[in-house]
Image (spheres, grey):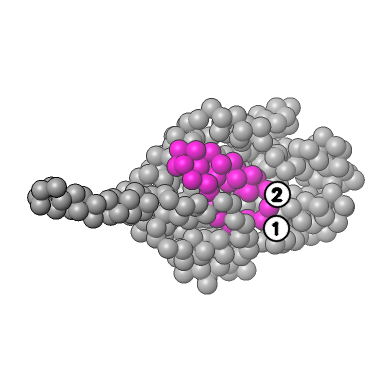
Amino acid sequence: MPHTTRRALLGAAAFLPTTRALAQDAYPNRPLRMILPVGPGGLTDAVGRILAEQIAVPLGRPLVPENLPGAGSTLGALALLRAPADGYALMTATNNHPVMNLLYPNFPYDPATAFAPVALAARQTFMLVVHKDVPATDMPTFLAWLRREGAGVNYGGGTPGTTNAMAGELLKATLGLDFTMVPYRITAAAIQDLVAGRMHMTIDTPTVLQPLVEAGALRALATSGAQRGAPDPSLPTLAESGVDGFDVSAWQILYARPDVPPDILARLRAAAREALANPTTKERLARIGVETWPDSSPEAAEAHLRTEVARWTPLAARLRAG
């Protein structure tokens, strides 16, 4: 073999391991984490798990769900921000995200700027339900009972700042009435006590509540959106039932760390966009009463978060002041 040919082959052989190493290091080359800053069994947990499975398809790697509930989602948010900035950790955030730093002063980040939005993912209208033994069959009789009983009425919710706790606080503020907020570390425990009769009422998602309503354990009185709709169009909205301006829905935004390399963040956003446009994803979410947003872009997520910060900041400030 001529000397020049042998030298060329040796050079090519030396290059091959480097090429293989680069291929092995191509993102993503291992499973990703999907941080769920809530307990198991609720809406955000269900949505996050569906997103994890569907986004895994275009990425070609699994997204492993990891429940990290507590302190109004701040434990999960801190876990994301403490993860390496390599794009292998995502988080499914929900309604309490905009006010984490207001209700939990030890959370040192601005939720509007400390996270990189990947996609505006999903939404669902809430329901107001009462225990089956509460002497109210519709909103007028319920509001009369609430005015009469006041602080003797117990509202089962999550820790301060969680989605259904904030909905309950907004209801109190809008009505100008008093009832007792009872915090639970996870909302599933609050709903268990509601079914058992240890709580009187709550506001939460149809995904969790509708099966209990259909079983006769709870009674649905109203929905929380601007218009009537699923799962029961016969239910009035709170706004048309005397709770002026009440329009609250559960929502989820997918986040990454803000310092993830731009090419990796772009890959994540493209995978999320593809997954949310996938009819299978829409069908799976629809089965639990959830819809995708018309615009799932990171820009739409940022705009939505700004709206939510403006909506909830005054209420959060009042709660923090005591």
Which residue position is annotated with label 1?
A: 186
Residue at point 87% right, 38% down? 216
Determine whether label 2 and label 1 are within 8 Å by CB. Answer: yes
Q: Amino acid at mark 2?
A: Gly
Boundaries of the magenta span? 34-63
Q: Is residue 265 left or right of residue 253?
A: left
| Residue 149 position (above or below residue 140) | below
User: Mark 2 to mark 1: distance in Å?
Assistant: 9 Å
Q: Seen from this angle, which residue lies furthest front? A: 1
Residue 274: give x, y in percent of width and height.
Answer: 44, 34
In the figure, residue 135 lies in which quadrant?
A: top right
Q: Position of residue 104 (x, y in %)?
A: 55, 67
Q: Name the secondary structure under disc 1.
A: loop
Q: Nearer the viewer, mark 2 or mark 1?
A: 2
Quadrant of the rendering where the C terminus is positioned:
bottom right
Q: Circle 2 — which element?
A: loop
Measuring from the top left, give residue 39's x and y in whole percent: 67, 56
